[in-house]
Amino acid sequence: MATQIIMDYSGDSRHEFNPADAAALLEAEQRFNALMREGYTAAVRSPTGDPTVIRKFDPKAEETLFVPRFVGG
Amino acid sequence: MSRQLRRRCADAARRVLAAWQRFREFGFHSEREARGLALLKSWLSPEQLAQYRQYRHFDVTGCHSGKRYRIRYGVSMNVCELDSLGRPLVGRCFVPKDNLVAGDVMLAQKIALETNERGVLLVAKTFSPRWRTIHTEV
């Protein structure tokens, strides 16, 4: 199972999907694109554990984290 | 003061101290704060996690400048650029626009500095860091 984690008021919201299921994959890609349009940053972890920003949906990513846009404090 | 009263006071002081140590060790977090911290810890490198567990802050390296930043537990005014000796140089205040818990904010700041340092510093506001005994605070 793959997971999309969206940071929010509750801590985070998680959406799990089976990458082998075409319908679930399409839904995950649509969610990814919608969040990108809202200004979220998507990050995945590289094999070394370092965060990497992605701009296109990665169907092989096991865990994608969505971070809201930043503002000056 | 009677011996019995002194003993009761000593017992009470020990209980308070034990409770305080438990609080310091495990923290007192709501469920949402705990979720945020769990997510943060799962994304920290082993070195950052060890540093966070000891001091409740961790250091990151900016992806563009190679500068070191310290991210302290908190939701604002909690990022500081460090000098070559690890002392706080200037505060950098930038936060996610949504209302997030501390763990999420710290993780978002880490990812931003490690992947888009220039971009996030463009929106960050500076402040004078007033962190006291920055290496030992818990």
Image (cartoon, coloured by chain):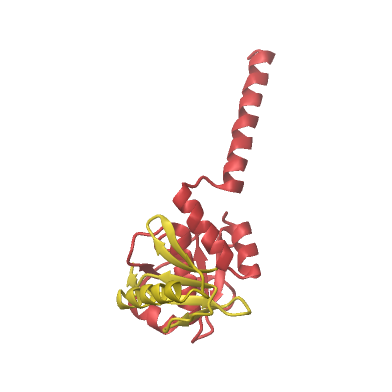
Chain colours: A yellow, B red
**In the image, is residue A61 above or below residue B53?**
below
Picture quadrant where residue B46 is located: bottom right
Q: Is residue B12 left or right of residue B70?
A: right
Q: Residue furthest left?
A: A38
Provide residue B135's location: percent of width, then percent of height.
59, 62
The front one of B49 and A49 is: A49
| Quadrant holding the N terminus of chain B | top right
| Quadrant holding the C terminus of chain B | bottom right
The front one of B33 and B122 is: B33
Does any portion of residue B124 appear in the rendered image? no
Picture quadrant where residue A1 is located: bottom right
Q: How many marks?
A: 0
Provide residue B82's location: percent of width, then percent of height.
52, 74
**In the image, is residue B57 above or below residue A49?**
above
The front one of B66 and B101 is: B101
* Point 41% across, 60% down: residue: B75
Provide residue B83's location: percent of width, then percent of height.
54, 76
* Point 53% across, 77% down: residue: A61
Provide residue B117's location: percent of width, then percent of height.
45, 81
Does any portion of residue B126 appear in the rendered image? yes
Q: Is residue B43 left or right of residue A23?
A: right
* Point 62% across, 42% down: residue: B21
* Point 30% across, 78% down: residue: A37
